Image (cartoon, rainbow, N blue to C red):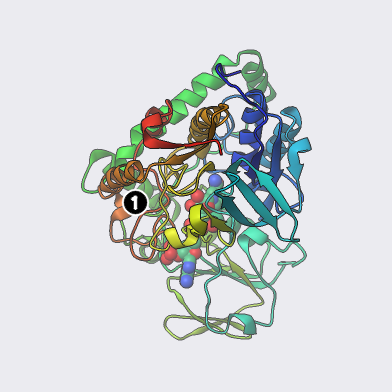
Amino acid sequence: MPSGKDDQSLRIAVLGAGMSGLAAVAKLKEAGYKDIDLFEKSDGVGGTWRDNTYPGCGCDVPSHLYSYSFDLNPDWDYKWSLQPQILQYFEDFADKFGVRPHCHFNSEITDCSYDEASRTWTLTKADGGTHTADVLISGLGQLNIPSIPDFKGKDSFQGPSFHSARWDHSVDLTGKTVCVIGNGPSAVQFLPEIQKQVGKLISFQRSPAWCRPRGQRKYTEADKRAFDRQRWRINWYRWRIRAFADFGFTAFHQGENGMAKSMKKMCLKHLEDQVKNPEMRALLTPDFEPGCKRILISDDYYPALIQPNVEVIRQGVKEITPTGVIGDDGMEHACDVIIYATGFQSTEFLTPMQVHGREGVSLNEVWKDGAEAFKGVAVPGFPNFFLLYGPNTNLGHNSIILMVEQQIGYVLQAIEKIAAKDVAGLDVKPEAMKAYNEKLQADLGKTVWAGDCASWYKTESGQVTNNWSGKTTEYAAIMREFDPDSWQVIPSA
Ligand code: NAP
């Protein structure tokens, strides 16, 4: 338990029962806080791993690293685990760490407003009910609201259509002609699965992405026993995956560098090894440098795309008709089902929820030109409000759980200060925020994400709002110690 704490009776509200919210509650409990309420809009825990149930859904970060450092799991079946086992891990975590008694399921929060006089947050639920808290922590993350572009004629399509993150398992794809729009990390996982089942698969690719080999590995019972009996093996393995991935971060720097060259070489070789037809290879070769968009990781994506029942359309979508999809060239491709693998509303953090800080200022308004936060966790004018997996904390190369654990450690230090008797709150100083983000954006300006390539990492105006600018160790270094000089203390009323 942290020393110097005067008061553990703080009322703490956590939003979202995904990977961040669950860990936050576990760590708050460990620190001795008791009055914790977690609000989750769905009926269970797991967040994105509950929402995404598409065939082949899995993690493109090795499981021993895509898991909490304080809840190592020796029982992963695969190096790259599949969604059911990942969801089970979070379900088990919620039980093991006693998170469930703090959860309010089917409780979507639509508005959070700070009251200056009482120094409290009022949360309003979709059903109109309210809840008051001293501290508010958002674990809503960056990828929770699916995005379906507003294609002309979208609603006229007569067959079933759904987003990959809301897979409609009642639709039988057997023998059907299925049109998949989008070719990001979600599509690359389900496409090889449905290709075996459908009659014809039409893959609309506005911009083909770089793809590298995955090298799936199934762990034997002996492997699992060794991981279980000698936990240092997991820690050593975690360290190696993390260090190797961080070492490769220079591949994301702009300009010619050895790491970027070898990444491109690896991806081109993967394409050449798996796609022998030169015309098909040309069709699937990206026209941007690797890393700008997330690099796909798959061994069965290209082999699926070259099957006789697959047609790759390297075009954007002009229109949806009652019977199919029209590409940019004006040609209609008839289909029975449309699957939108078109990603998430990633740059619209926290929407559609409203957050109002001091003097009723709206966070959406503050973020209208692009979301930003101090170290990804706080915004001036929104006292005692902390974000997990907030702006500029996403990674293209390593495990996001590492980042979230750093954020939770930092937020716990902040809450420890708030818990002191004569303190009602902490508000990050505007000048600290400005200095932090100026440096961050200058660093991001040197990365491929800032280059001439659209991705979910940045806004339409080009501001990179989602990604961290460096290695996970560099982020850990700035998050280790709470920096009181960057914060304004709000005294008790
Ligand atoms: P995404 O990476 O944002 O990909 C969206 C796809 O839809 C892209 O191919 C994009 O084309 C296309 N698209 C979007 N708007 C379009 C439009 N108006 N017309 C035509 N095409 C359009 O989405 P995602 O595949 O769902 O992946 C999102 C993120 O989720 C990933 O980067 C990853 O972080 C996470 N994810 C993780 C895992 C995991 O294993 N951990 C698995 C799945 C997803 P353009 O490229 O041309 O824009």
- 106 horizontally vs 489: left or right: right
On whether ligand 1 comes within 8 Å of the CB at mark 1, the answer is no
Taking the spot 65% from the left edge, 33% from the top edge, the residue there is: 10
What is the quadrant of residue 225 in the picture?
top right
Q: State which quarter of the image contains the C terminus.
A: top right
Residue pictured at 53% horizontal, 41% vertical: 384
Determine whether, in the image, residue 136 is placed left or right of residue 358: right
Residue 136 horizontal/vertical position (percent): 59, 43
The quadrant holding residue 365 is bottom left
- Is there any visible trace of residue 302 in the rendered image? no
Q: Report the quarter where the N terminus lies.
A: top right
Residue 55 in the figure: left or right of residue 440: right
Q: Nearer the viewer, residue 400 or 268?
A: 400
Residue found farthest to the front: 493
Quarter of the image for residue 180 reads: bottom right
Residue 163 appears at what percent x and percent y? 62, 65
488 shown above or below 381: above
Residue 416 in view (yes/no)? yes
Nearer-the-camera pick, 55 or 276: 55
Q: Is residue 283 above or below residue 320?
A: above
Instruction: Tell me which amino acid carries mark 1.
Output: Pro
Residue 244 in the image: state x and y as whole percent. Answer: 40, 30
| Residue indicated by mark 1 | 290
Mark 1 Cα-neighbour bin, 10 Å: few <14, some 14–19, many ≥20? many
* Residue 162 % position (x, y): 65, 68
Question: Which is more toward the observer, 176 or 94?
Answer: 94
Mark count:
1
SS category of the residue bearing label 1: loop
